[in-house]
Amino acid sequence: MKVSEAVLARRSVRAFLPTPVPRSLLEEVLAKAARAPSGGNLQPWRIYVVSGEPLARFKAQAAQAVRQSPMGEAPLEYDIYPKSLKAPYRDYRFKNGEDLYATLGLARENKFARLGWFANNFQFFGAPVGLFCLVDRQMGPPQWSDLGMYLQSLMLLLREAGVDSCPQECWSIIHKTVRSFLAAPEELMLFCGMAIGYENPAAPVSRMRAERAPLQDFCRFID
Ligand SMILES: Cc1cc2nc3c(=O)[nH]c(=O)nc-3n(C[C@H](O)[C@H](O)[C@H](O)COP(=O)(O)O)c2cc1C
């Protein structure tokens, strides 16, 4: 698979088959993704991978945590989005949500069903593997951007191996439950999770395709 093919084929998959992903494949792509660049070669990504019985146990805890703290476990460690998101970012976000719920056939008034669907996030959308990306609290925005490079490299390598994924910031709202399950040291902060597995192509949400702004909206050539 060419890089371009992997880039175009990667999407956030939100319905998975229970088919397990071989541990050897995971080890290979997780190690290869660490070829991602990072400022000063700090390699700030800290990764936890959960599957099998521990994942089933964790999902039960996560479901309970979300029921108990639907607004998140206070204090939240970071804002997923800026507090008053401005245009055009606000419009992109709004459209993405509306497109997703339209794919699912859930109207705006149907808040309850929309919330119910959102809860699937906390089951890793049925994926057999759940990954968490943490970072030392000492790190700042430059190192957080390095996490993105690692995670995109990982998702492209997974695609090359025929495996799907969905990055998930939503896990940060139950950071306490995640930290305690992982027994992660206090110095590490949770950035995001990622569902990993094989897409269930029959699920309605699998028809979702997120659009992108055209080049001229975000790029200027000075020449
Ligand atoms: C860091 C990060 C966190 C994300 N968190 C979530 C999430 O919690 N739940 C979710 O359904 N999608 C999440 N997404 C997926 C985005 O909504 C998705 O990447 C975007 O809409 C573009 O769609 P595409 O990935 O299918 O191209 C996240 C993406 C990134 C990069």
Image: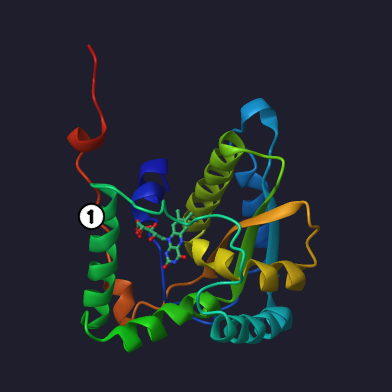
Tell me the amino acid under the disc marked 1.
Asp
Q: Is residue 51 above or below residue 169?
A: below
| Horizontal and vertical percent position of residue 222 | 24, 15
Q: Is residue 123 above or below residue 28?
A: below
Q: Residue placed at 23% from the left, 55% from the top?
A: 91
- The image quadrant where one finds ligand 1 is bottom left
Pointer 1: what residue?
91
Q: Residue placed at 65% from the left, 52% from the top?
A: 30
| Horizontal and vertical percent position of residue 65 | 61, 81
Q: Is residue 163 visible?
A: no
The total number of labels drawn is: 1
Of residues 133 and 108, the one nearer the viewer is: 108
Q: Is residue 71 above or below residue 143?
A: below
10 Å crowding of disc 1: few (<14), some (14-19), many (20+): few
Q: Quadrant of the C terminus?
A: top left
Secondary structure beneath dot 1 equals helix
| Horizontal and vertical percent position of residue 218 | 26, 35
Q: Indicate left or right for 58 with 210 as reference.
A: right
Q: Residue placed at 48% from the left, 63% from the top?
A: 165
| Applied colour scheme | rainbow
Q: Residue placed at 41% from the left, 68% from the top?
A: 13
Of residues 100 and 197, the one nearer the viewer is: 100
